[in-house]
Amino acid sequence: MWRELHQFVPTLGDARSRRAAVALAIGATVAQGCAAGAGPAPRGAASPRSAAPLVRTVPADDCGAPMPAARASRFELHSSFWLNLHNFLYKEARRRRGISDPGLGAKGNLTQDTLPSRALDDAERRAWTRALDYYERVAFEHQRFGDSLVIRVNNRLTEAADGGDLSDVSLDPALRAALLDAAPVYRAVWWSAHDQRNATWASAMHQLLDRHEECLADRAASVFATAWQPAPIRVDATVYASWFGAYTTLRPPHVTVSSSAVGSQGVNGLEVLLHEGGHSLLARVDSALAAAAARQGRRLPQQLSHLLLFYTAGELVREVVPEHVPWADTFGVWRRNATVRAYRTLIEREWRPYLLGRTGFDQAIDRLVGGLPAG
Ligand SMILES: [Zn+2]
């Protein structure tokens, strides 16, 4: 029942019917338990590899009844040599400049991750320094949140063959030269530890996804009234993934998560996957917020839908793991400033009833926007 509702909700044309369907879907989930601790036993660990992504199937539904047939996971985890090198050079170039500004959730195992497995010889040190020089020069033009250097090359680097020479992807020649300079050094001295850390993290995530993915993904699709894209979302594990510890590029959605960051471990990592993947579900929320703001003459803050995603991902994970403390509470998202705290209060008051099945999508959006200042 839950799955059928999920499938037809986005295609319903009539807003009132859609509201009813969404509310009913939420009721069904709560009634069926979205049970904490339910679900199949975790399966064995497997190492992610760019060339051979681990394909998983989820054998049973976490929300109650066994599924009629296995369904492929929405998340396909990888460990890409080139993307790891790129992000590590970016991080090391910042560190060389004395910049170490990880967000609370992005703090990780800096000492272990940056320690080479052996001393670099002179030729290696020269090559590594040349690459860092390039990154220091170029990357700092792009260091703001939403980092355009990362966004521009993220997908291309993950398409490149791990053992190749980057000739199979289109890259700026200077960037390619820097990466090729650094690659043998990285491969000899850091990669094996980083790849292992990625594999360990992926294994932990697979166990949590096996247990909770079905329920979380269906709930998110229902809450945001948007179906997931049919193809799995690629998730790349890297030891460093921006100052925040994770980022997502869209079209197609592509998630990069730091396997080292404290905020990516255990159930927090599961919430990160739901949050980052959830970015691909926000179009309807964004358009509904904009329409309501125009109708009510309110000024719509750009960050509202993102904060809504933080709140929702945390609450949905808490539905399946009751002891979980939402990521935004643990890692200080709501403590950033008074404005964000005020939005949290608004979301708690007007959006939470929707998550509990007490109001519909349109009503929740209207009431959220009604709490914003006049435009
Ligand atoms: Zn986000």
Image (spheres, helix red, strand yellow):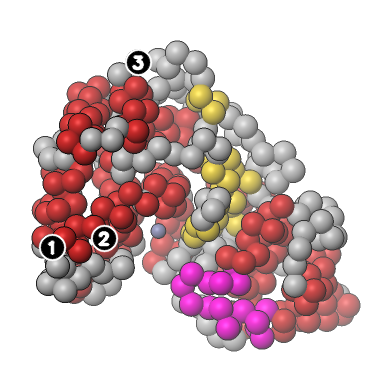
Which mark identifies residue 197?
A: none
Foreground mark, 3 or 2, reads 2
Quarter in which the C terminus is drawn: bottom left
- Residue found at x 23% / y 67%: 300
Residue segment shown in magenta: 135-150
The magenta stretch spans residue 140: yes
State yes or no: Cβ of the residue under disc 2 lies below 8 Å from any atom of ligand 1: no
Read off the residue under disc 3: 65
Report if the beta carbon of the residue with label 1 is closer than 8 angstroms to ligand 1. Answer: no
Tell me, yes or no, if residue 286 can be seen here: yes
Magenta region, mostly helix, strand or loop? helix
Q: Residue at x 12, y 54 (%)?
A: 367
Answer with the quarter of the image where residue 239 lies.
bottom right
Q: Position of residue 28 (x, y in %)?
A: 22, 25
Alpha carbon distance from label 3 to label 2: 38 Å
Residue at image coords 66%, 86%: 137
- Toward the front, the furthest residue is 13
Q: Is residue 181 above or below residue 275?
A: below
**Residue type at mark 1?**
Gln
Which one is in front, 115 or 257? 257
Q: Nearer the viewer, residue 44 or 61?
A: 61
First-in-chain label (3 vs 2): 3
Pointer 1: what residue? Answer: 296
Name the quadrant where ligand 1 sits: bottom left
Where 370 sits versus 224, above or below?
below
Q: Which amino acid, mark 3?
A: Ala
- Is residue 146 a member of the stretch shown in magenta? yes
Residue assigned mark 2: 290
Amino acid type, label 2: Ala
